[in-house]
Image (cartoon, rainbow, N blue to C red):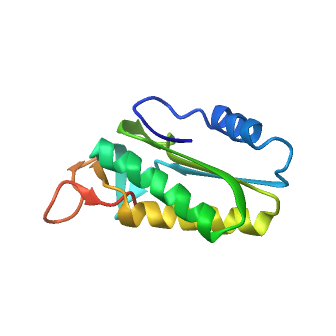
Amino acid sequence: MFQLTHEVIDSGKVVRALQSAQGGGSGALVVFEGVVRDNARDKAVRHLEYEAYEPMALKKLEEVGALAKEKFDILGIAIVHRLGRMEVGECSTLIVVASAHRVAAFDACRYAIDTIKQIVPIWKKEFYADGEVADDSAAWIEGVK
């Protein structure tokens, strides 16, 4: 289950779908929610915007999932990334990993978020209380950090 969405991410729905797809074999379920925080670079954040090259980003999310399944003894993985405007506290990235045991689930989840930041064409723009800035030279921040 890999998805890009402009809608609010329903974590519970994704968890239930992955559990249902795995049957009763999962002894561990690790959920990572990346949420919009109220500060970055010592500035107050008002909101964020995420933009992506959607066809490639979706293929890359699927690739991350396939790599995680190859590298770790997991039963399933779901990755959902939100695009568009997000307010402080909202979930921007959801990763759910099911496995028989916790170590594989934790390891695969960490691998997935780290790899997403490296290879998926998604960019973040931060809007601060004193104006929008990503860094000193560009408005868009590379990666989904």
Residue 1 is situated, as x and y percent measured from the top left of the image, at: 57, 41
**Residue displayed at 22% across by 49% down:** 132
Q: Is residue 68 visible?
A: yes
Left or right position of 40 against 8: left
Task: Name above or below for residue 81 compared with residue 74.
Answer: above
Task: Name above or below for residue 6 compared with residue 24.
Answer: above
Residue 63 is situated, as x and y percent measured from the top left of the image, at: 46, 57
**Quarter assignment of residue 21:** top right
**Residue displayed at 37% across by 63% down:** 119
Q: Is residue 50 visible?
A: no
**Quarter assignment of residue 116:** bottom left
**Viewer-side residue, 84 vs 134:** 84
The extreme top residue here reads: 7
Residue 4 is situated, as x and y percent measured from the top left of the image, at: 42, 39
**Residue displayed at 18% across by 54% down:** 139
**Viewer-side residue, 126 vs 39:** 126
Figure disc tally: 0
Left or right position of 72 against 143: right
Question: Which quarter of the rendered picture does the C terminus lie within?
Answer: bottom left
Left or right position of 48 against 112: left
Residue 2 is situated, as x and y percent measured from the top left of the image, at: 51, 43
Left or right position of 53 against 145: left
The extreme left residue here reads: 137
